């Protein structure tokens, strides 16, 4: 359900850092929202040098921008907890300072999303949704939880 795109500029992230960031984002989303970890998707995109601007000028220092798309329906307090925990996870995993981290969380209506071939449930209805899936898909998703 959540898709997090990590765009980074003027820095290099190695495979271990990417895996650490992906695990931290997944764990944080799970702990804050209760959503199963198999829903969390993390995509990395490196911005080529000279292709990131602020104020009309090329950005010179390292930056990480996390754009998270999550299901709508969660209270503001939970989203604040989520975004602050994501910031700490990115700082720890990347070594950058908090002023080099940008995070935007966007709510999406579950009825307008399909994952694993099915329209997504409202928050709190994940178990019913999961039970409606084929046995093969359930087994695949359970394996991702480990």
Image: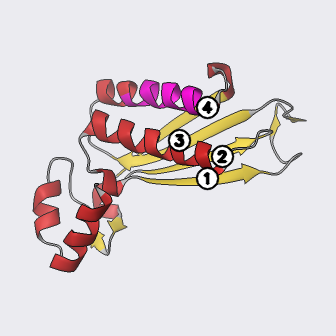
Q: Secondary structure at mark 2?
A: strand
* Label 3: few (<14), some (14–19) or many (≥20) C-alpha neighbours in 10 Å: many
Front-lying residue, 48 or 105 = 48
Q: Are the two marked residues, 1 and 2, in contact with CB atoms closer than 8 angstroms?
A: yes
* Label 2: few (<14), some (14–19) or many (≥20) C-alpha neighbours in 10 Å: some
In x, y percent, where is residue 64? Answer: 66, 36
- Mark nearest the camera among 1 and 4 is 1
User: Residue 44 got which mark?
Assistant: 1
* Residue at image mark 4: 102
Give the Cα separation between the discs numbered 3 and 1.
10 Å
Give the Cα separation between the discs numbered 2 and 3.
12 Å
Q: Quadrant of the C terminus?
A: bottom left
- Mark nearest the camera among 3 and 4 is 3
* Label 1: few (<14), some (14–19) or many (≥20) C-alpha neighbours in 10 Å: some
Q: Quadrant of the N terminus?
A: bottom left
Q: Are the two marked residues, 3 and 1, in contact with CB atoms closer than 8 angstroms?
A: yes
Give the Cα separation between the discs numbered 1 and 2.
6 Å
User: Residue 12 lies in what quarter of the image?
Assistant: top right
Image label count: 4
In x, y percent, where is residue 21? Answer: 53, 41
Q: Which residues are magenta?
A: 82-93
* Residue at image mark 3: 21
* Residue at image mark 2: 7
């Amino acid at each position: 359900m959540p898709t997090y795109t990590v765009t980074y500029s003027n820095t290099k992230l190695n495979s271990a850092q990417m895996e650490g960031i992906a695990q931290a984002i997944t764990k944080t989303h799970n702990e804050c929202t209760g959503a199963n970890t198999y829903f969390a998707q993390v995509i990395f995109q490196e911005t080529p040098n000279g292709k990131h601007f602020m104020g009309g000028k090329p950005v010179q220092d390292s930056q990480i921008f996390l754009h998270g798309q999550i299901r709508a329906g969660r209270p503001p307090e939970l989203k604040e907890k989520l975004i602050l925990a994501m910031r700490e996870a990115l700082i720890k995993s990347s070594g950058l300072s908090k002023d080099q981290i940008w995070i935007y969380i966007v709510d999406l209506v579950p009825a307008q999303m399909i994952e694993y071939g099915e329209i997504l449930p409202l928050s709190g209805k994940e178990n019913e949704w999961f039970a409606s899936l084929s046995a093969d898909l359930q087994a695949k998703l359970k394996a991702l939880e480990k």
